[in-house]
Amino acid sequence: MKLYDYKQAPNPRRVRIFMAEKGIEIETVQINLMKLEQHSDAYRKINPLGEVPALVLDDGSCISQTNAICRYLEDIFPQTPLYGRTPLERAEVESQNHLIQMNGIIAGGEAFRNSSPNFKNRAISGPHAYPQIPELAERGLKRIDNLFADLDKHFADQQFLVGDYFSVADITAFCTMGFIRWVKKTIPSECGHLQRWFDQVASRPSSKA
Amino acid sequence: MKLYDYKQAPNPRRVRIFMAEKGIEIETVQINLMKLEQHSDAYRKINPLGEVPALVLDDGSCISQTNAICRYLEDIFPQTPLYGRTPLERAEVESQNHLIQMNGIIAGGEAFRNSSPNFKNRAISGPHAYPQIPELAERGLKRIDNLFADLDKHFADQQFLVGDYFSVADITAFCTMGFIRWVKKTIPSECGHLQRWFDQVASRPSSKA
């Protein structure tokens, strides 16, 4: 297996932290997104979607999309489960992970890709060109403010996103907090519960992956 | 268990078709989204997110979000698996389902919620108020056109979204095709492969659920 990675981007980081939590090591290949290497003919032959991360299996099958990769790894390396341990817990992880992806990763992407001069006509990742919408960048920033408040409330009486169980949803949220610094958003000083959770996740060895 | 449902909306329909494919029957309760019943105090006590669908278990636990509900049902009723049968197939289903959700359900929602007079200040589902962005409604329509072309190309040599295996991703795509009629989008006449797939899914008894 080979993981196509880019050290600086939030989604590949989600996969790397996931692997570190499970104690998995996989050969990685860097694809420089700033140089648009993901759209090169060579990379499109590997992953026709032109997205990173991608996991390529020994038979050449390519798995694209962060959760698809992580779920595959969970399936074949079931130790230290990160998608839940019981049916209800798995549902709660899926729900929280989806919410954080939409209100964190996607919202941050709206703020960043609709304002950065480097993303003109690339406001959505993937093969299609979409022009930037400045109002959407602004809305992304508002969504992040709402996310801070929602998470702070959540962590007031829960250790992690799903009770006292560290899951893939915490990894998604942790990488969101790193990503949104690209649009100059950091945890507000009044969000003490969120900051406590963040510091706890940051202290895990996996956070350096 | 009780499923909180709204017959006219796309996401509850995804759950109903999923249940029909698996042969599951669950008591349903209608929450009228047009009358904003999802934001009533009574419903917020059941599902604090104020979203439909929601699955409430006998112990009162509430599972929110379409995929969280469907994955829970897959877990406890494993017959007729719809999220894949092998690790690679499960990864492919997750990937396709995510793509269709983003480029179909979310794109359609952008087009609809940013243009319908009924959704002023409710451009994103959930508890927060976001004003409509007319440019985002336009972009949603463009994304749907791109989805038609992408799916038509995909179905040129594949029966379903993941080879010859009918999965939850097909349900998501089928409900997308119904949903986008709300913004007057129907499968273009030149997309014969997509139409063939649609007719095949529409002919399954579950499509009436």
Image (tube, coloured by chain):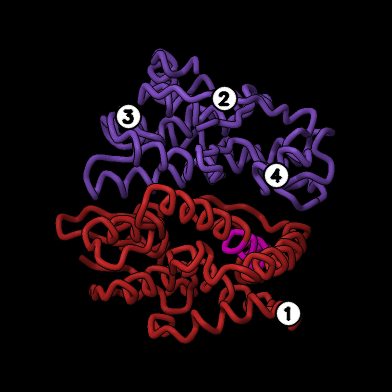
Chain colours: A red, B purple
Q: Which residues are magenta?
A: A104-115
For the C terminus of chain A, the image quarter is bottom left
Foreground disc of the pair 2, 4? 4
- Type of secondary structure dominating the magenta stretch: helix
Secondary structure category for the residue under label 3: loop
- Left or right: where does residue A35 sit relative to residue B54? left
Residue at numbered disc 1: A188
Q: Amino acid at mark 1?
A: Pro
User: At 74% from the left edge and 50% from the top edge, which residue is drawn?
Assistant: B127
Secondary structure category for the residue under label 1: loop
Q: Which mark is residue B28?
A: 2
Q: Position of residue A104 (x, y in %)?
A: 60, 63
Q: Amino acid at mark 3?
A: Phe
Foreground disc of the pair 1, 3? 1
Is the residue B145 above or below the residue A124 in the image? above
Is the residue A48 above or below the residue B206 in the image? below
Inspect the magenta stretch and tell me whether residue A105 lies in it.
Answer: yes
User: Which label's residue is closer to the chain start, 2 or 4?
Assistant: 2
